[in-house]
Amino acid sequence: MNATRDGYEHVQLVKRYSTCGMGPSQGRHSALATARIVANATGKSVAQTGVTTARPPFAPERLGHLAGRSFYPARYTNMHHRHLEAGAQMLQAGAWYRPAYYGPVNQRDNCIAAEVNNVRNNVGLVDVSTLGGIEVRGPDAGEFLNRVYTFGFAKQPLGRARYALMTNEAGVVIDDGVSCRFHDQLFYVTATTGGVDRVYQNMLKWNAQWCLDVDIANVTSAWCGVNIAGPKAREVLSKLCEDIDLGSEAFPYMGVREGHVAGIRARVIRVGFVGELGYEVHVPQHAGEALWDALMAAGKEHGIKPFGIEAQRVLRLEKGHIIIGQDTDAMSTPEEVQMGWAVSNKKPFFVGQRIIRELNKAPQYRSLVGFVVDDPKAPVPQESHLVIDGDKMTGRVTSCNYSPTLGKPVGMAYVPPGKTEPGSDIVIKVDGAPVAAKVVALPFYDPDTARQNL
């Protein structure tokens, strides 16, 4: 019933929405029951509705197989117990446990809003140890990254970071991160929490073919890190930096430095994922808790507070930053998600280049855009809610949340051609009811990026 109410009325779409007919059933046990329910909901006959294709196994499964997994791997960052002590509500992202937000469960929305506002107005601290880390060393390190990522890296300056977008052979976006060049022959590349293993495997696979003179190491477990962000971030961090000049000229946006923070050897990256002045501080894994304690103590007079990934997602959404796997799917190309600027047209080759060039010659059938809901009484759309035009599905919401900064719901959605220009009106189906939204230019917050360039 939920599937048909959200617009997935064909029995094949109901199967994928609800997973009826998947897993042990494969259509044999649930096909007819599903067809009857869909027929009743849509006012059609069972014959008109039809059933999905039944696939092996046809024989009954053992009860033990249906019980599911008996082992669920769990990973904890070095700061895990500090989060618990601060009242964090934890959630599992992949194998990692991360703080969703800090505070009681019945105050979830208020806690998240308070964390967002504190980052925007003071300074916040978030654990980013779960981000993947890969070191690429050797004479051909720059050339190697030039081939596996869409941007240009062969001539990346020392002491600078660069956004790194990865596509597969089909030109589909599969991961992103930041490439930091600390030496002519040393790059430190970050990757998404859930995608780092795949990225590392892809790197090994491609270099087995290219045979470049590089060494590739997955160092995710060797380093941990935090992101300190907010207009007072420099004031707090400067108290602990012994040999790093944090001045805006000496350490510009997207700069990287090596030195010591609170007496701990550190790699510092000036990035702005949440849209404020911010620094990622990466230290050896065993020193994470000491770094956390030092930053919390140094920021006490400035109102520093930890924030979780729910607030981080709101902050990044306000800045229009995509999350791979949430705002992208198995068909997303760079142009569709407004990342064409991250694709170099000057270098001779990168993985997926040929397909991307061919796809860019054809008209796009969808684009990822930002939207706002101005009606204060309208429900907030959620991920996977449909963009509709009459009774036709034309797109879907990928991210949406109430923005404490803007005072209204903001989100991103795939829309068809003709609805991509700012000012275009779209309709989103929320719990069976239409909600009016308006397409706007990204980012929603600080379009001139003045905040992160303080």
Image: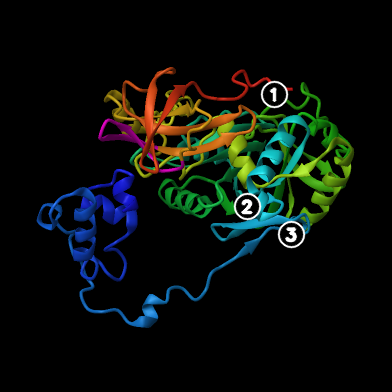
- Lower sequence index among marks 2 and 1: 2
- The residue located at (51%, 55%) in the rendering is 197
Query: Which of 130 and 87 lies nearest the eye of the viewer?
Result: 87
- The residue located at (52%, 74%) in the rendering is 71
Whether residues under marks 2 and 1 lie with C-beta atoms below 8 angstroms apart, the answer is no
Quick one: label 1, few (<14), some, or many (20+) residues within 10 Å?
some
Residue, disc 3: 84
| Left or right, 73 with reference to 433 | right
Any magenta on residue 390? yes
- The residue located at (85%, 31%) in the rendering is 235
Q: Is residue 120 above or below residue 36?
A: above
Any magenta on residue 444? no
Query: Which of 256 and 9 lies nearest the eye of the viewer?
Result: 9
* Amino acid type assigned to the residue bearing label 3 in the image: Leu
Residue, disc 2: 130
Cα gap from disc 1 to disc 3, whole angstroms: 31 Å
Cα gap from disc 2 to disc 1, whole angstroms: 26 Å
Number of disc labels: 3
- Lower sequence index among marks 2 and 3: 3
Q: Nearer the viewer, mark 2 or mark 3?
A: 3
**Disc on res. 451:** 1
* Amino acid type assigned to the residue bearing label 2 in the image: Thr
